[in-house]
């Protein structure tokens, strides 16, 4: 006889990578600009007032990057 | 559909009111029922001027060229998105060359609007003008580009319906609502008003006042008056003799009228428009087929601006038209080949009208083409249609373009040979460049991912990313060692406190014994917590084991204790063999956790050394691997 253990894998988290919230309009504009110029974050930041290039890059990577896919799925599951 | 020459018309409109841009939103070709970018003209600030030729351009040409460059840049950026291999032409603008207003204009090209959605969509749905002040701070439901407008400091945006689409104009200045501005823009589009009349004749529109509208009767003969809709707020209807209407609405019966509302104040004006004989080269309608007709062009440059004139100089209508027909706003470029071509043809036609026209047309009266309409009078004063041949005209139409083409063929043959030589050399170089570009793109992608995973990156360059990653890994390694040491200490402490009875109770043989006081239940989490085992830590290790196939056994030792984690295929008696193997090294178990899943046995054994250390971690590992590998 044996027991089955429930396992959870913990990602290395950092306080600096907190979720960045963008308005729908900001997100739409970032997406349009990314389609046009790619990862030129300074150019994209120029179109979005009061947002730094680092913020936008971080937002994009957390939203679309492979490294954060697990986290995204988990947060989606929690929301639903 | 985008009307021909629209860019020049937009240029006239924007420059006449000194605004920043004009966009014509039209029905999308790819998605019917959706408004997309049709045409545009940029009239705002320019940061970097890039020209392919060294010729000095005037402000009008600069504006048109810049608009074209921005459109090309957008297209090239779109193609790069689809296929990154596409190379942008060297003369084209690069994204770094643009001002904020140019960026606004460029990004607008990517927008599409459903009918009733966004400013253009709502304008088309309502069929009336919309004037938006403080566009940069407008609600995104009203103006979806408000954020973009904020970055470009666009303050005022105006939309009005035009030819099954919407014209949008914007400026960086705050302009209070003024309908006369829209009217002025609409009248600037009157530059495309064409009046086709026979040579050496004067066309006069006579009108009479009735219920604040002027009714003008038509003589239904060969000659078209083509008018632009939206002169005022009413639609102008015209009747075409050839069975096809030039205006928006379908053909009207014979007694139809042209309804014109005055542009300035909505009240009727008695208008007497004259088209002067020498100002227009005319199209002769001798054929039912409209393709035989040459569109009218201004024959002399000096007289371009003076086409419509009013008899009454004090009439506000006259003043409006004089504003509208500013010589700066001509649509015909005197230097263009097209203009020259049309002028040559018009001269030929003028000189040979005796040959082209029949006898009955030579005796054409000099009086007006239009007659006053009276109720009840029969309209039988129509001129007979000519049936003469147009051989000379057709010859001119076919042979003049041929002359242009002959000159081109000679130079092309020479160029073809030279280009063939270049192609082969280019292809080899291109393959190398492409593979190099792909390699760099992959590298950059990996660096981006690495950068996203490592917090506190100081700089953007690759060396900094790698340095920070190395530093971060070292930090993680130190942290792991600290945690391992801390875990070892807690295990030893709990081991010394534990009684022999407890140890027996924790051995695998008794682990799930039904003789326990648990009524046949598995011992719960409480028992494990009593042992002081770091539960979360163990779960992570288990997870690591589940994922690994190469390292089936992990043995980590500290001063007083050993932690063994292992994975092996599950079968009867496997547990006993493992325990015997461990016992041979004088090892006492402080805790054992076993899990069976997917046909595998996962074990985590914590133990305390009772006697002298008999074996190293390596020997223990080898012994356990031998047990694990037995079938």
Image (spheres, coloured by chain):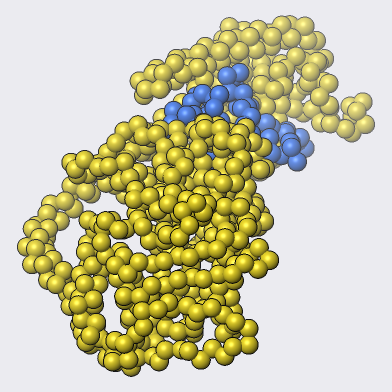
Chain colours: A blue, B yellow
Q: Residue at x 79, y 18 (%)?
A: B529
- Quadrant of the rendering where the C terminus of chain B is positioned: top right
Residue at position x 63%, y 58% from top?
B267
Q: Does residue B375 appear to the left or right of B433 in the view shown?
A: right
Q: Quadrant of residue B262?
A: bottom right
Where is B482 relative to B53, above or below?
A: above
Is residue B415 rendered to the left or right of residue B455? left
Image coordinates of residue A63 in percent, x first then y, are 57, 36
Look at 63% across and 47% down and name the residue there: B130
Q: Position of residue B384 (x, y in %)?
A: 40, 92
Residue occupying image coordinates x 65% and y 7%: B489
Q: Position of residue B614 (x, y in %)?
A: 55, 12
Where is residue B152 drawn, in percent x and y? 49, 33
- Decide: is B408 above or below B115: below
Say above or below: B69 vs B547.
Answer: below
Q: Is B540 in front, or is B251?
A: B251
């Amino acid at each position: 006889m044996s027991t089955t253990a429930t396992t959870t894998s913990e990602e290395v988290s950092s306080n600096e990578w907190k979720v960045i919230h963008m308005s729908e309009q900001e997100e739409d504009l970032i997406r349009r600009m990314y389609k046009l110029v790619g990862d030129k974050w300074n150019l994209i930041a120029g179109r979005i007032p009061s947002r730094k290039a680092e913020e936008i890059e971080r937002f994009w990577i957390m939203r679309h990057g492979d490294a954060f896919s697990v986290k995204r799925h988990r947060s989606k599951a929690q929301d639903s | 559909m985008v009307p021909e020459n629209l860019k020049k018309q937009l240029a006239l409109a924007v420059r006449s009111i000194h605004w920043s841009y004009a966009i014509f939103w039209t029905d999308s070709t790819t998605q019917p029922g959706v408004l997309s970018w049709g045409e545009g003209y940029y009239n705002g600030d320019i940061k970097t001027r890039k020209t392919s030729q060294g010729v000095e351009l005037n402000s009008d040409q600069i504006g048109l060229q810049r608009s074209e460059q921005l459109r090309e840049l957008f297209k090239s950026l779109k193609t790069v998105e689809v296929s990154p291999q596409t190379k942008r032409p060297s003369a084209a603008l690069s994204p770094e060359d643009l001002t904020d207003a140019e960026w606004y204009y460029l990004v607008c090209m990517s927008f599409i609007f459903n009918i009733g959605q966004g400013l253009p969509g709502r304008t088309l749905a309502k069929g009336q003008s919309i004037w938006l002040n403080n566009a940069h701070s407008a609600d995104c439901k009203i103006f979806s580009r408000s954020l973009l407008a904020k970055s470009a400091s666009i303050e005022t945006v105006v939309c009005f319906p035009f030819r099954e689409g919407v014209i949008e104009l914007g400026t960086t200045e705050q302009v209070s609502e003024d309908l006369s501005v829209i009217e002025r823009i609409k009248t600037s589009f009157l530059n495309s008003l064409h009046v086709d009349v026979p040579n050496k004749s004067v066309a006069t529109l006579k009108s009479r006042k009735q219920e604040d509208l002027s009714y003008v009767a038509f003589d239904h003969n060969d000659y078209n008056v083509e008018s632009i809709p939206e002169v005022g707020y009413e639609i102008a209807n015209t009747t075409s003799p050839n069975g096809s209407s030039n205006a928006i609405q379908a053909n009207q019966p014979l007694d139809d009228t042209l309804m014109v509302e005055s542009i300035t104040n909505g009240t009727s004006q008695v208008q007497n428009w004259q088209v002067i004989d020498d100002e227009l080269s005319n199209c002769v309608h001798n054929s039912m087929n409209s393709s035989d007709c040459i569109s009218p062009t201004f024959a002399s440059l000096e007289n371009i601006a003076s086409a419509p004139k009013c008899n009454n100089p004090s009439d506000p209508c006259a003043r409006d038209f004089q504003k509208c027909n500013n010589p700066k706003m001509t649509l015909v470029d005197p230097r263009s080949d097209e203009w020259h071509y049309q002028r040559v043809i018009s001269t030929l036609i003028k000189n040979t009208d005796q040959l082209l026209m029949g006898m009955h047309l030579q005796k054409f009266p000099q009086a007006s083409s239009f007659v006053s309409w009276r109720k009840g009078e029969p309209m039988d004063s129509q001129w007979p249609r000519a049936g003469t041949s147009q051989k000379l005209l057709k010859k001119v139409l076919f042979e003049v373009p041929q002359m242009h083409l002959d000159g081109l063929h000679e130079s092309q043959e020479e160029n073809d040979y030279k280009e063939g030589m270049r192609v082969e050399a280019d292809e080899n170089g291109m393959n190398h460049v492409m593979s190099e570009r792909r390699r760099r793109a992959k590298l950059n992608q990996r660096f981006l991912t690495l950068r996203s995973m490592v917090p506190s990156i100081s700089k953007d360059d690759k060396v900094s990313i790698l340095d920070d990653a190395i530093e971060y890994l070292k930090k993680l390694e130190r942290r792991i060692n600290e945690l391992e040491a801390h875990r070892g200490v807690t295990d030893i402490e709990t081991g010394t406190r534990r009684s022999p009875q407890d140890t027996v109770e924790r051995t695998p043989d008794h682990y799930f014994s039904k003789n326990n006081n648990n009524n046949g239940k598995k011992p719960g989490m409480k028992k494990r917590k009593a042992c002081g085992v770091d539960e979360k830590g163990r779960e992570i290790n288990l997870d690591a084991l589940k994922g690994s196939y190469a390292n089936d056994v992990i043995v980590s030792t500290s001063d007083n204790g050993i932690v063994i984690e292992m994975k092996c295929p599950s079968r009867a008696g496997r547990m006993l063999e493992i325990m015997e193997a461990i016992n041979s090294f004088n090892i006492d178990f402080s805790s054992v956790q076993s899990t069976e899943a997917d046909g595998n046995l996962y074990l985590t054994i914590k133990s305390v050394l009772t006697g002298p250390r008999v074996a190293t971690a390596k020997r223990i590992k080898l012994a356990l691997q031998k047990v694990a590998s037995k079938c």
